[in-house]
Image (tube, rainbow, N blue to C red):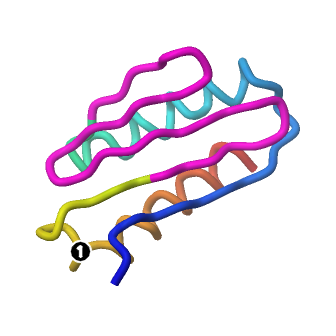
Amino acid sequence: MNSDITISRDHSLGVDEAKRRLDQVADALGGRLKLTSRWEGNRMQVVGQGVSGHIDVDDVSVRIHVSMGLTMLMFRESIRSAIESSIDQYID
């Protein structure tokens, strides 16, 4: 089983608004998944216990890539579902 999760979503928000909303996603998921995040240009770096990844933002899309350690594999689909639900709620 692949331990990576990749999710892409189109948007019409522009970079600044998309980043603002992604901050809300990071806040919402951060507490549940014990994540920390920081922006480096248009890339949000995300680190948590057993997971790491990044979110790239441009004018028309958001691309999320999450890598997880073996201990987190059993939660892969739950993590994917939580990310997709939050992204769809804030970016849609």
Q: Disc 1 designates what residue? A: 73
Could you tell me what secondary structure mostly forms the magenta stretch?
A: strand
Q: Nearer the viewer, residue 32 or 52?
A: 52
Exactly how many numbered labels are in the figure?
A: 1
Look at the numbered disc 1 and give the secondary structure of its residue.
Answer: helix
Q: Residue furthest right?
A: 12
Image coordinates for residue 56, horizontal then vertical, percent: 60, 36
Where, by quadrant of the figure, is residue 74 drawn?
Answer: bottom left
Q: Using the image, determine if residue 86 lies above or below residue 23.
A: below
Q: Nearer the viewer, residue 18 or 24?
A: 18
Apparent side of residue 58 relative to residue 21 in the rendered image (left or right): right
Look at the image and give the residue range highlighted in magenta.
36-65
Check if residue 71 falls in the magenta segment.
Answer: no
Q: Residue furthest bottom?
A: 1
Image coordinates for residue 55, horizontal then vertical, percent: 53, 39
Question: Badge 1, how many Cα within 10 Å: few under 14, some, many 20+?
Answer: some
Where, by quadrant of the figure, is residue 31 drawn?
Answer: top left
Check if residue 41 falls in the magenta segment.
Answer: yes
Which amino acid type corresponds to the residue marked 1 in the rendered image? Leu
Q: Using the image, determine if residue 77 lies above or below residue 33.
A: below
Apparent side of residue 11 relative to residue 82 in the rendered image (left or right): right
